[in-house]
Image (cartoon, coloured by chain):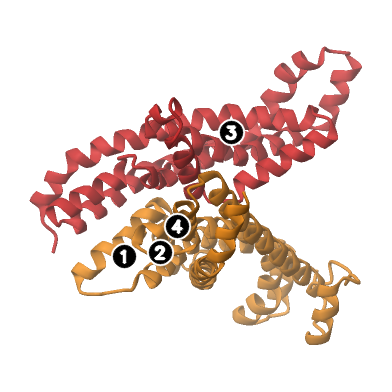
Chain colours: A red, B orange
Amino acid sequence: MWDWSRAFDALPLLLKGFGNTLIATVGGTLIAVVLGLVIAILLRVLPRWINWLLKLAVAFVRNTPLVVQLLFIYFLFAKHPVLAGIPSLTLGLIIIGVHYSTYMSESYRAGIDSVPKGQWEAISALSLPPARAFRSIVLPQALRATVPSLGNYAVAMFKDTPFLFAIGVVELVTSAQQYGGRHFAYTEAFTLAGLIFLAASYPTSLLIRRLEKSLARY
Amino acid sequence: MTDNLTTLFSYAPQLWDGLKITFLLTAGGAAGALLIALVLGLAMASPYRWLGIPARIVVEFFRGTSLLVQLFWLFYVLPLLGANLDPLSCGIFALALNYGAYSAEVVRSSIAHVDRGQWEAATALSLSPVRMMRRIIFPQAWLLMIPSLATLLIQLLKGTAVVSFITLQDLTDRIDQLRQATGDTFFAYTVGLLLYFVLAWLLQVGMDALEHRAAVALGRREKSGRLRSVLSRRHRPKKEVLG
């Protein structure tokens, strides 16, 4: 039922796939962290009617399946002479990053809202320039409340990267499926894939929990 | 565009079949997840370590390994171990286990966040542990957990889209068939995304109504004159006011 030699044989291939999983996670997180902040700021400064449209767009991206979004963009680009050349890993990490930026923008919003009112009043009392005040007074305080939540979304994104299977990115789960199919060793391949996910995500979420506790104490 | 619409209308029965599969997965997955969440969440909230620690291990295990791994494990590995599940059951089990683990954490933390005075008062009245949980603690925790459960329910709906990888013809799969039939990716997938968006919105409306009911049952919110509370007023026996 469980063959250790098969398991060791599959491991290098799985780790190679895991490399792509990590690239997608890191790339996607970078995009989401930046774009999420941009969306959160835009939602504060834009006039009301554009704001409404942006909110609708964010809700649309957040409330529809990542898999369908991946397939949509993948097939849409497939016919385009230039865009068809984008490697599916790159395409996948951009889409997953945009998807999670809609979640992260909500964390930023909550973080900015959590900055005490007195801070805003002090800013206008000192008549500080708005951009500078936002950067050096509001944002550092908002980030305290935001960072753990961003971390949790990064872990969630990590566990969603197998969805890139849909557009043919050979990440951890896809390589497990390929190995399993080729050698009829699904048990070893998928069990190992699950354990690798667990080994990476559990310590990370413990770290985030500790970070959350230490940031909350100030 | 008119060609697309004609194709869409002729394709409506297939889309409907896909919607039914997606609905079955969402409903089955959510029911299973709720059951798992209540059992594991109560175990984690209990003062007994022999209950709490195994439950915590199960929760971390199913949260930590990805949904797709669990789905593929049920679909590819289970038959090798001699248990054959049809793809629909595989999908429902995977969704229930994965989102059940996430929801268990919500159940645990909501129970932990019920005001301490409520626990103390229930103890002072020497209510039995079961009665205390059922009548005092859980109704209040339920109100706290509904918003998070609503988020998870919508994530579960979005998660159902992966079952097209295990041969199920759900909404996602039917949309791809529509793409092939029309040859118009933009049209087919816009229709698909809109359908998912409406489904998610309906779930949110339903969960908001549930939250309203839970708040009314605790006497924390007035019954409004809206339809849903008119309906619930007729069917619900009067409950004692808490909180």
Q: The residue marked by circle 2 belongs to what chain?
A: B
Q: Chain of mark 4?
A: B
Residue A49 image point, x, y percent: 83, 36
Q: Are marks 2 and 4 in contact (CB under 8 Å)?
A: no
Determine which residue is flagged by label 3: A147
Name the amino acid, label 2: Ala
Expressed as whole percent of the image width and height from the top left, the position of residue B82 reads 20, 74
Give the Cα distance between marks 1 and 3: 35 Å
In which image quadrant can residue B128 be found?
Answer: bottom right
Chain identity of mark 3? A
Q: Which residue is mark 1?
A: B74
Assess disc 2: are there few (<14), some (14-19) or many (≥20) residues with their C-alpha within 10 Å of its C-alpha: many
Determine which residue is flagged by label 2.
Answer: B94
Quarter of the image that includes the C terminus of chain A: top right
- Tags 1 and 2 in contact by the CB under 8 Å rule? yes
- Can you give x and y, in whole percent of width and height, for residue A38 in the image? 66, 27
**Place of residue B42 in the rendered image (x, y in percent of width and height, measured from the top left):** 53, 69
Q: Of the residues shown, which amino acid type is indicated by label 1? A: Leu
At 34% from the left and 54% from the top, the residue drawn is B69
Tell if the residue under mark 4 belongs to the same chain as the one under mark 3.
Answer: no
Does dot 1 land on a helix, a strand or a loop? helix
Which numbered disc covers residue B24? none
What residue do we see at 76% from left, 36% from top? A113
Labels 1 and 3 within one chain = no
SS state under label 4:
helix
Mark 4 lies on residue: B177
Instruction: Name the element at disc 2.
Output: helix
The answer to the question of whether label 1 and label 3 lie on touching residues, with beta carbons closer than 8 A, is no
